[in-house]
Image (cartoon, grey):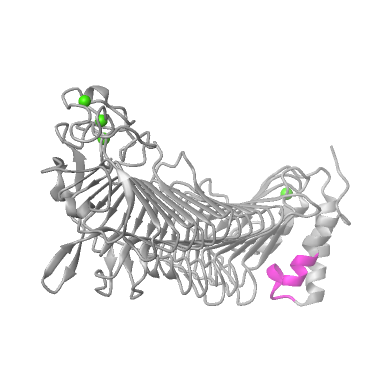
């Protein structure tokens, strides 16, 4: 099979134009020399008798006779004009400075074929890369690599064993038809790491990092995605700074971001909203169910939404088995959801979690000096659902614990749901707060050891505060050692140490001791003899904090004594499952 040489094919001419426009591989040559070089390459290619099969193009020092060229741009042009999915291998001994490549039209379904650029070879012809990552250094005013399809096709690029750094623009731009996968690639110290738009696809895998990128005026210092782009995050996004929204990730325009194993979004900062992630405009942030590690959203900071800021109807952030810890903001230290967006924090049954209590956590987040802030803030008709989650050690950096609430829902039709949640050892005046006609539902929640400081010592946190008579419902909960709640709430089958703490609730029971397994370490699961076991008659929850099925009838604990006659659901976040019934998520005990 032969094919006509693509002298005038649109994609070829586009490559030519791009290369000429950018000057990329020929930056040191004047225009006439560039044209002469192109012509020479074309003539050489057209003289070859048979079409070239997919092959490896070696780039390395001229002194090494195994190297084909010392110019990455020429290697890219060769891969473009030759048939098949070619690979460019980069060897030590060449400095790749001032790099700006347009990798367009590398469509595996076309003659041009896809392209792999693989760094880390000690010398040309080596069978394996043994030299770490090869650095491609950018320039002030161009991306290091741009990828797009041409003529409606794709451009499929795999980048391996590289460092992309020091561009004054985004290091990597993926647009329509572009599909880029990073494997063991660091993208660092650029003015923004990655931009994906127009249905582009970007994946980062296996030891790929986006780190220490910074953009003072741009959104999304790690990743900016929009216009139906798809982004797979399988590596850390760390230490990035945006002067706007989204220190780690800014997702908009129906972009889909899938968080996979090692999606560790940490130590990012946004000057405005969403230190870790800002999602707007129908973006979807979700989780790969096959993930083998927990997601981390850790040490991120912003003005609003230290870890996550979600904004807009159809915008959805789904975080399963996530550790949301040590984030900081003025409002919404961990989570800020607004304008009809939806945020869900929950567990899924995979093997990523070693600790049955702390698989999904919302812990050690710190509020700034905004006195009506909260660890999770919901307003503008947004909805936040937190389930199977452990909430611990949150507080304020400014000693404002006597004025803050852990969870606040504000404005009409904003809603907050807590289900199968353990809330332990937080510093806050109230667990929840409602402002305006917002809705708060608390089901199967266990609280203990929450407090706020006063001049005469610590006082217990109250369950609920309302500013303007919102509705709150509390059912099947074990609210140990809480203080009085000034807000009116209804509900049933709740347990507390004193009637005063639940004075506004209905059908609640005072118990002497809930028989927690180990309250000193925050293990607020129940012993089988607890009065809270087999206490409640009905629930919407079908599982407990440990993902064990509810309800389970403990044989020697009378049903509904205390509690609702005939009850088999346990109050609080734990359902006691005797070992004989224990499922695979249990790992022993209760
Ligand atoms: Ca090719
Ligand atoms: Ca039970
Ligand atoms: Ca029973
Ligand atoms: Ca249990």
Q: Is residue 247 visible?
A: yes
Q: Residue at x 17, y 31 (%)?
A: 528
Occupied quadrant, residue 326: bottom left
Asked if one can make out residue 359 in the rendered structure from this viewpoint, the answer is: no
How many discs appear? 0
Q: Does residue 292 belong to the magenta stretch?
A: no
Horizontal relation, residue 98 to residue 493: left or right: right
Q: Which residues are magenta?
A: 17-29
List x then y, in percent, for residue 285.
52, 52
**Which quadrant: the C terminus?**
top left
| Closer to us: 96 or 484 | 484
- Residue in the image at 65% along x and 72% along y: 142
Indicate left or right for 190 with 453 as reference.
right
Q: Nearer the viewer, residue 349 or 217?
A: 349
Residue 337, horizontal then vertical, whole percent? 47, 60
Ligand 2 placement by image quarter = top left
Q: Is residue 25 magenta?
A: yes
Question: Residue at 72% of width from left, 50% of height from top?
Answer: 154
Instruction: Give the x, y percent position of residue 23.
Output: 72, 72
The residue closer to the viewer here, 38 or 409, is 409
Residue 361 location, x and y as percent?
A: 33, 51
Horizontal relation, residue 109 to residue 381: left or right: right
Q: Quadrant of residue 143?
A: bottom right
């Amino acid at each position: 099979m032969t094919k006509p040489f693509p002298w005038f094919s649109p994609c070829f001419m586009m490559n030519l134009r791009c290369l000429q426009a950018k000057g990329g591989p020929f930056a040191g040559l004047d225009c006439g020399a560039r044209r002469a070089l192109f012509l020479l390459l074309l003539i050489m290619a057209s003289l070859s008798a048979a079409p070239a099969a997919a092959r490896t193009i070696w780039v390395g020092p001229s002194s090494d006779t195994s190297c084909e060229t010392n110019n990455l741009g020429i290697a890219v042009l060769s891969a473009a004009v030759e048939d098949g999915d070619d690979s460019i291998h980069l060897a030590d001994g060449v400095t790749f400075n001032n790099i700006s490549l347009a990798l367009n039209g590398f469509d595996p379904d076309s003659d041009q074929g896809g392209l792999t650029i693989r760094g880390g070879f000690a010398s040309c012809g080596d069978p394996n890369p043994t030299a770490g990552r090869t650095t491609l250094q950018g320039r002030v005013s161009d991306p290091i690599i741009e990828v797009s399809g041409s003529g409606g096709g794709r451009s499929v690029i795999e980048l391996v064993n590289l460092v992309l750094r020091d561009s004054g623009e985004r290091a990597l731009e993926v647009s329509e038809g572009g599909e880029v996968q990073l494997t063991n690639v660091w993208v660092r110290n650029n003015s923004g790491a990655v931009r994906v738009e127009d249905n582009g696809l970007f994946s980062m895998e296996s030891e790929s990092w986006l780190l220490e990128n910074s953009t003072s005026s741009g959104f999304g210092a790690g990743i900016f995605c929009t216009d139906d782009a798809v982004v797979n995050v399988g590596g850390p996004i760390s230490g990035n700074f945006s002067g706007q929204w989204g220190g780690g990730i800014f997702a908009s325009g129906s972009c889909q971001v899938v968080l996979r194993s090692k999606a560790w979004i940490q130590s990012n900062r946004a000057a405005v909203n969403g230190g870790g992630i800002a999602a707007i405009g129908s973006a979807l942030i979700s989780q790969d169910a096959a993930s083998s590690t927990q997601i981390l959203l850790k040490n991120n900071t912003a003005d609003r939404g230290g870890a996550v800021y979600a904004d807009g109807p159809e915008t959805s952030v789904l975080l399963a088995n996530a550790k949301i810890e040590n984030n900081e903001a003025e409002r919404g230290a961990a989570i800020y959801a607004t304008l009809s967006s939806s945020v869900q924090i929950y567990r899924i049954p995979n093997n990523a979690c070693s600790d049955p209590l702390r698989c999904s956590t919302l812990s050690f987040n710190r509020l700034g000096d905004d006195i009506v802030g909260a660890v999770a803030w919901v307003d503008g008709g947004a909805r936040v659902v937190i389930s199977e989650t452990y909430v611990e050690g949150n507080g304020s950096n400014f000693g404002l614990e006597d004025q803050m609430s852990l969870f606040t829902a504000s404005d009409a039709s904003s809603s907050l749901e807590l289900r199968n949640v353990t809330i332990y050892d937080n510093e806050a005046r109230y667990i929840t707060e409602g402002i305006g006609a917002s809705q708060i539902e608390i089901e199967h929640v266990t609280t203990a050891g929450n407090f706020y400081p006063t001049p005469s010592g610590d006082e217990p946190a109250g369950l609920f505060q309302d500013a303007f008579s919102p509705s709150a419902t509390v059912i099947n909960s074990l609210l140990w050692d809480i203080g009085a709640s000034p807000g009116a709430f209804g509900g049933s089958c709740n347990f507390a140490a004193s009637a005063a703490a639940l004075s506004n609730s209905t059908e609640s029971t005072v118990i002497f001791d809930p028989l927690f397994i180990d309250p000193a370490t925050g293990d607020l699961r129940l012993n089988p003899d607890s009065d809270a076991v087999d206490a409640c008659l009905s629930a919407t929850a079908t599982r407990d904090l440990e993902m064990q099925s509810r309800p389970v009838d403990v044989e020697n604990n009378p049903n509904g004594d205390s509690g609702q006659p005939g009850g088999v659901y346990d109050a609080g976040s734990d359902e006691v499952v005797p070992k004989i019934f224990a499922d695979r998520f249990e790992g022993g005990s209760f």
